[in-house]
Image (cartoon, rainbow, N blue to C red):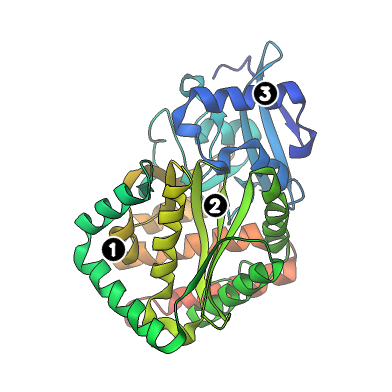
Amino acid sequence: MDEATEIEIIRPDALRPQDRAAWEALRASEPGLDHPYLDPRYALAAADVPGAALAVFRRAGAAVGFFPFQRRGRLIQPLGAPLTDYHGVIAAAGEGLDPATVARRLGGVLRAGGWMAPAGPPPGFMARTRMSTDVAGGREALAARLEERSHRFFKNMRRLRRGFEREYGEPVFTWDERDPAVLDWIVARKRDQYRRSRRHDVFACGWTVDLLRRLFDARATGFGLRLTSLRTAAGDLVAAEASLDDGRTLHLWFPTYDPAFARHGLGTILTRLELEQAAEDGYRLVDFGAGEEGYKTALAEPGGVVFEGVAEGPRPDLTRLAGRLLAAGPAPLRRVQLSLSRRFDIINACETRAADWWAAAAGAASAAARKLPGAPA
């Protein structure tokens, strides 16, 4: 990107109709940008996130790139972080709008955990495997592929399902839940999970729940938050998931289940049913996000990469310098540093009040200290 390219900072909901048309045209021309997180409707839903902004890059007045982001002091994060699993600049690959350029033009430090880069890996960023399932071709073709790849896994899942059916009857699957109480149930279960695992509660700050509710309300337009659920024959809710949906790609986002039913594998049963229904309805892809956790390898396969890293603006950043020193240390210290860095990314994104930030930071430091070699459990 040459310096003659101008940058305009606006609110996401101030996007002009002609600029929105340019955004949609860019996505249509770049297959790597075809994901619901990079849809302008996602940025519009996130317009009330604290610090929300949209960078519009222009040349001769015409929009050539867009980057939805949020500011936390000098820290620049993708808009909707930490909820936004994938992010990046919506621009042609040849525009040169990489993280370093964006950080420099915005005058801050850019931190990203799932950067989509059609032009190739950003220098210094770490690649993370993106897991997904191709569901094109219908239900039967999907079932055949899954069984061929993970026959023993699904044989065990059928055994677990039969055990559930003996106790609670045939599970009732709902593909498109319209009851907002199901979203409340998902959030409550996730918050319980964060407490048990000593992870930062991303829903405690409030604005993250508001974003999910706006996306849920938008579902009637064909884009937004899809809720799926699994109930007992008696109607008791035992598993549910909130996913981002644009009608072509279903991005699995917040899966959860009642821990009392953990032995029945209901989370995996629900995911299999979601895959089958997406295939039946003509979806192209079901995206599981980045990372190769155990259950994903049976239901999905590597579908590309996204990138995690930090890009600095024009001034030195002490946090970044400290990170470089830790990165040169022994492997256990590097793992702690990466864990702590990710925790602080979440805290910085969520907590906009000083008291809440300090309380969360103390908890993160304590959790990181327990991971150091020789630390008490």
Give whichever of discs 3 and 1 has the lower sequence position: 3
Whether residue 301 is visible, yes or no, is no
Q: Amino acid at mark 3?
A: Ala
Whether residue 284 is visible, yes or no, is yes
Asked if labels 2 and 3 touch by Cβ distance under 8 angstroms, the answer is: no
- At 67% from the left and 40% from the top, the residue drawn is 41
Kindly report the distance in space between the C-alpha atoms of the residues bearing marks 3 and 2. Answer: 40 Å
- At 48% from the left and 83% from the top, the residue drawn is 259
Q: Position of residue 310 (x, y in %)?
A: 49, 45
Farthest top residue? 60
Image side of residue 145 versus residue 18, left or right: left
State which quadrant residue 22 falls in: top right
Q: Position of residue 50 (x, y in %)?
A: 74, 53
Q: In this rendering, is residue 344 above or below 140?
A: below
**Dividing the image into 4 quarters, which one contains the N terminus?**
top right
Give whichever of discs 2 and 1 has the lower sequence position: 2
Which residue position holds label 2? Answer: 318
Which residue position holds label 1? Answer: 331
Q: Position of residue 118 (x, y in %)?
A: 43, 30
**Mark 1 crowd level (few <14, some 14–19, many ≥20, 10 Å Cα):** few
Give whichever of discs 3 and 2 has the lower sequence position: 3
Q: Amino acid at mark 2?
A: Leu
State which quadrant residue 338 falls in: bottom left
**Mark 2 crowd level (few <14, some 14–19, many ≥20, 10 Å Cα):** few
Which residue position holds label 3? Answer: 21
Task: Name the disc covering residue 1, or none.
Answer: none
Kindly report the distance in space between the C-alpha atoms of the residues bearing marks 3 and 1. Answer: 48 Å
